[in-house]
Image (cartoon, grey):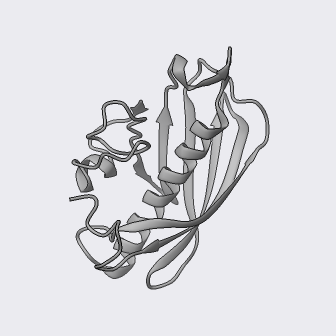
């Protein structure tokens, strides 16, 4: 589960979300908690035993979910700030890729950072990193776009 002081962006803007990665209303999910930082968003995550691929190492799918959800929220918050709105647009992942740089150990808290690389009116490219004990374990990039009424994900955070 995510660590952090105060209310996360997910808790503030999507308290009823059931997303496996970032939904505050999904007690069986990862329930990540992202917070604003100088250059985007950051979060900490304490893996559970069931997040292991094999004893002592975190599953790559869990790592991908952490980067995907955190990157999506980084984009949503940047698009909100750019537009001057009070709430983020509903964004979805158009594409993302990750590189698993080294095995991610089970036990220590993981740190994930997201930073916008470029932004347009309805989309943002985000760079994400996942570190453990100061070591880069995974990195990724993603394109996240806001969706309009009629898209299945529109208003999913309500």
The C terminus - image quarter: bottom left
Residue at 34% across, 81% down: 83
78, 145: nearer the viewer = 145
Q: Residue furthest bottom?
A: 121
Q: Is residue 32 left or right of residue 50?
A: left
Residue 134, given in percent of the width and then of the height, sits at 68, 33
Residue at 53% across, 21% down: 50
92, 6: nearer the viewer = 92
Q: Residue furthest right?
A: 101
Q: Is residue 61 left or right of residue 93?
A: right
Q: How many marks?
A: 0
Q: Is residue 39 left or right of residue 148?
A: right
Picture quadrant where residue 112 is located: top right
Q: Residue furthest top?
A: 55
Residue at 63% across, 61% down: 96
Q: Is residue 148 left or right of residue 127?
A: left
In the rendered view, tell whether residue 37 sits above or below residue 143.
above
In the rendered view, tell whether residue 78 sits above or below residue 53.
below
Residue 148, given in percent of the width and then of the height, sits at 33, 80
30, 107: nearer the viewer = 30
Residue 46, given in percent of the width and then of the height, sits at 49, 26
The N terminus - image quarter: top left
């Amino acid at each position: 589960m995510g660590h952090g002081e105060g209310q996360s962006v997910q808790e503030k803007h999507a308290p009823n979300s059931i997303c496996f990665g970032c939904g505050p209303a999904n007690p069986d999910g990862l329930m990540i908690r992202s917070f604003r930082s100088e250059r985007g968003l950051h979060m900490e995550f304490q893996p559970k035993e069931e997040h292991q691929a094999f004893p002592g190492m975190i599953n790559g799918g869990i790592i991908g979910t952490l980067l995907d959800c955190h990157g999506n929220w980084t984009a949503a918050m940047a698009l909100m700030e750019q537009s001057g709105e009070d709430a983020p647009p509903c964004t979805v992942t158009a594409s993302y890729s990750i590189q698993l740089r080294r095995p991610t150990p089970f036990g220590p808290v993981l740190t994930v950072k997201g930073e916008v690389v470029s932004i347009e009116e309805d989309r943002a490219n985000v760079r994400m990193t996942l570190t453990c004990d100061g070591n880069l374990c995974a990195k990724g990039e993603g394109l996240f776009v806001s969706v309009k009424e009629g898209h299945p994900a529109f208003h999913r955070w309500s």
